[in-house]
Image: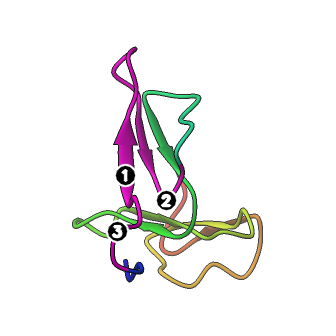
């Protein structure tokens, strides 16, 4: 994440919630912006699209592979 010098990149509030890209986390982990896991299991975009097995979800839920 690129940020200007001195800008906050993440926040930990008094309740232990972590905000990444925001300074007021409402959940234990609250991310503003794109999110990617190192396993590539899922990917969420800032527009709210979620990909499972896909890093470029074209809809609200995009599943690559077989669905059981």
Q: Residues within 10 Å of mark 2 (few under 14, many from 20)?
A: some
Q: How crowded is mark 1: few (under 14 residues within 10 Å), some or many (20 or more)?
A: some
Which residue corresponds to mark 3?
6
Callout 3 secondary element? loop
Asked if the magenta segment contains residue 30, the reply would be no
Q: Are marks 2 and 3 in contact (CB under 8 Å)?
A: no
Between the C-alphas of marks 3 and 1, the distance is: 12 Å
Callout 1 secondary element? strand
Residue 47: image x %, image y %? 74, 70
Label ID, residue 21: 2
Residue 65: image x %, image y %? 48, 73
Query: In the rendered image of this protein, does residue 45 appear above or below residue 41?
Result: below
Q: For this view, does 30 lie left or right of residue 4?
A: right
Between the C-alphas of marks 2 and 3, the distance is: 14 Å
Question: In this rendering, which labeled residue sits more in front, label 2 or label 3?
Answer: 3
**Relative to the observer, which residue lies in front, 10 or 57?**
10
**Relative to the observer, which residue lies in front, 6 or 68?**
6
Residue drawn at x 57%, y 58% is 32
Q: Are marks 2 and 1 in contact (CB under 8 Å)?
A: yes
Mark nearer the N terminus (2 vs 3): 3
Question: In this rendering, which labeled residue sits more in front, label 3 or label 1?
Answer: 3
Locate residue 51: give its quadrant: bottom right
Extreme residue toward the left, this view: 38
Residue drawn at x 55%, y 58% is 67
Extreme residue toward the front, this view: 6
- Scheme of colours in the image: rainbow
Residue drawn at x 57%, y 67% is 33
Between the C-alphas of marks 2 and 1, the distance is: 6 Å
Which residue corresponds to mark 1?
10
């Amino acid at each position: 994440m690129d940020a200007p010098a001195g800008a906050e990149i993440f926040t930990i509030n008094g309740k232990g919630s972590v905000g990444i890209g925001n300074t007021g986390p409402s959940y234990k982990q609250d991310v503003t912006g794109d999110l990617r896991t190192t396993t590539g299991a899922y990917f969420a975009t800032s527009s709210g699209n979620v990909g499972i097995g896909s890093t470029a979800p074209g809809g609200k839920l995009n599943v690559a592979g077989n669905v059981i």
